[in-house]
Every structure is written in structure tokens, then in C-alpha cells.
Image (tube, rainbow, N blue to C red):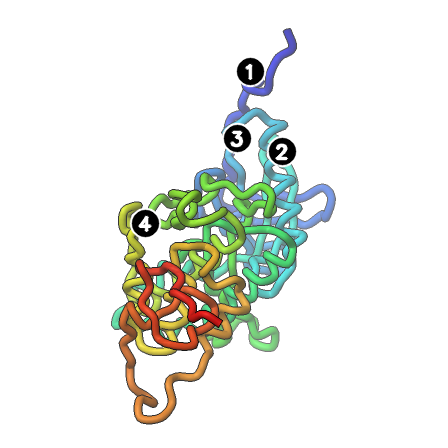
Amino acid sequence: MASTSSSAPVNPFVRPTQGENITCEVTHNTYTMGEKIGEGSFGEVYACVDVWNNDLAAKVLKPLKPHEEVKASALAELQKLLTLRHPNITYVFDAFEFRETFYIITERCYCPLTNLFTMEKFSGRSWLLPIARGLLQAVHFTHLNELVHQDIHAGNVFTTFVKDEMLPEDGDRQVIQFKLGDLGVAKLFSEIDATNTRGQWMLPPEALDSSEFGPLDRRIDIYHSGLLFLQLALSREMQFSSEEIRAGKPRDLALQLPAPFNFALEKALRRHVSYRTASAMELWRDLNSPALSGEHAGEAVQMPLSAVAESGDAPSEPSIPTSMDDPPARRAT
């Protein structure tokens, strides 16, 4: 009987040591390894610098499976990163095998958005639109390439600073950017699977019950972006139980925000996929929609549940949905 991959041996995990120089045989670039700065399910991340003095990060893949399977996973992640070359997606510099361990070298970001919530007197609404502008451009580009991230949250969106080449030693870097990372979990439209969303607290309604809420498609990323923006708008990290997600609690919270965040985020967080915001570009337009004019201009308007229709356009006359985000009754034409 032919042997299966499950019977193949798993290599020991050979970690780099701080100060070690590791050279890629293809690019001839040498990386001086620094301290460990992160760890995920499939790898450890180390700070490093190259011969050009670029601040980089080395993702070292854990040998959780036999060598050939780990190699295939590394090549698949590398191909996604090479395909998704965009200013708002973490940039890949190199990839290679060293001591039968796989390295992926990317730009080193300053911190994930989770760190922002620990800032004293953090006001998330002042950060929301700048973050949304970067993140939604990355999501739009990802979808154009027929990939879905499926795991967008504050830990996978990063802040980074642009170095002034004329003052390379100046630590006071003033230009900040926001980038989407951890593209290893991204899948083609045809490969979307609820298990690719690792945090159970952020499973979209359609992952919990597709027969009720609709199919799994790229709008998973819209829902997750809406969850992140909701937390920024409320200036606190939040997690939701499956029961709360089914009941539409994230959307309820969005409805209590001032305009235009209430309109934009309740639409992105609708439970039924067919009535949710369709694209990253549409969500960006909604976030930048003008506030109510006239006597209510400048007010933080609270939107009652009954005033929100479950479609892309407002109904021609007021109607009350039969549930939180069911489509409103249409007037006969």
C-alpha cells in the first residue's frame, strides 16, 4: 500500500537565533535576525533587517505537517502575496527555505490596530475614516483578484510609518499608513469556507446559518470590516456570541451611532447577505455620505430601527420591516 502524507515525518522546528545572519541563495540578500515579535497558528514572526537596512519581518512557518505539505502551503501564501501587490497590503520582499524551514520576508509594520485601543483617551472615530480608506482599498483590490480574506479584524490590520530617506536616523516619523496583512488565510471565491474565519466571535451570520442568511461570498469581508469600524466608532474592542450575531446585535449598535456612521455601518452589518453592502467601494462611499441637511445638520442623529430599510436604496415611503433587517414591503407600482 502506498504511503500517505499523514505517515510522512514532520521536521523539527528550527528557530532562528537573535543576531543570526541568514542568506537567501536566490536573491543573495542577508537578513540579520532580531527578537521574536509575534506568533500565530502557523508560524512565528521575528524582526530582522537586510543589507539595505530595511526594517523587515520574517515569518517562519511551523512544521505542523510533513515537509512537502508545509512547502506547498508556503508557496501558496507567497503566490497570494506576490499577486496582491498594493500599497495598503503588507509587502513581501523575499521567500526561501533555510534548514528545511520556510521563511517569508515582509515589511515590518509598527503595530496592529489592537494596540490603538490601549491608548489613553483613545477616540476611535477620529481614526475611523483614515483606517477605512486604507483597509477598504486593500479589500477592493483583493476582491478584484477574486480572493476573499475572511479574517479581517484589528489584529490583521496594521499601522506603519514611512521613513524619510533624507533623515534615515530620525525616529520622529510622521507619515502613517494602514495596511491589511495575514493574507495566508485568503481564499478564491470558489474556495470560501466558514472555517477560514478563525475567531468564533466574528463569524458572520451566513457562516452560522446560510439557509437563513444567504451564501458565503466576498461580503464576508464587508461584514468583518463593518465589525472593525463599529469598534473604532465605539472606541472599544468587542466580541459577540453566536446568539448575538444571529440576533443582529452588531447592527443594533451601529444604528445608535451618529450620521453617517449609522447609515453606513448598519448596512454593512445586515444579517441577510442580499441586503448587505455589496462592495468595499460602496462602503467607502456610504462612510463619506453627507450628513442630514436642514434643521438636523450637525446633529448626532439617532436612527430608529423602523426607519432603516433593508435594501440599497431608501423606500419611496416609510415602512416597518417585519424583522430587524428583513426587506421592507414595497409599494405596488
Q: How crowded is mark 3: few (under 14 residues within 10 Å), some or many (20 or more)?
A: many
Q: Residues within 10 Å of mark 1 (few under 14, many from 20)?
A: few
Q: Mark 2–mark 4 contact, CB under 8 Å?
A: no
Query: In the rendered image, which residue does mark 3 sit on?
Result: 63
Q: In which quarter of the image is the N terminus?
A: top right
Query: In the rendered image, which residue does mark 1 sit on?
Result: 7
Query: In the rendered image, which residue does mark 2 sit on?
Result: 71
Query: Marks 4 and 1, how far apart in space?
Result: 41 Å
For marks 1 and 3, the one nearer the N-term is: 1
Q: Is residue 91 above or below residue 331?
A: above
Q: Is residue 262 above or below residue 106?
A: below
Q: What residue type is disc 4 on?
A: Arg
Query: In the rendered image, which residue does mark 4 sit on?
Result: 246
Left/right placement of residue 99 relative to residue 214 reads right
Tag count in the figure? 4
Picture coordinates of residue 322, whole percent (x, y): 31, 60
Element at badge 3? loop
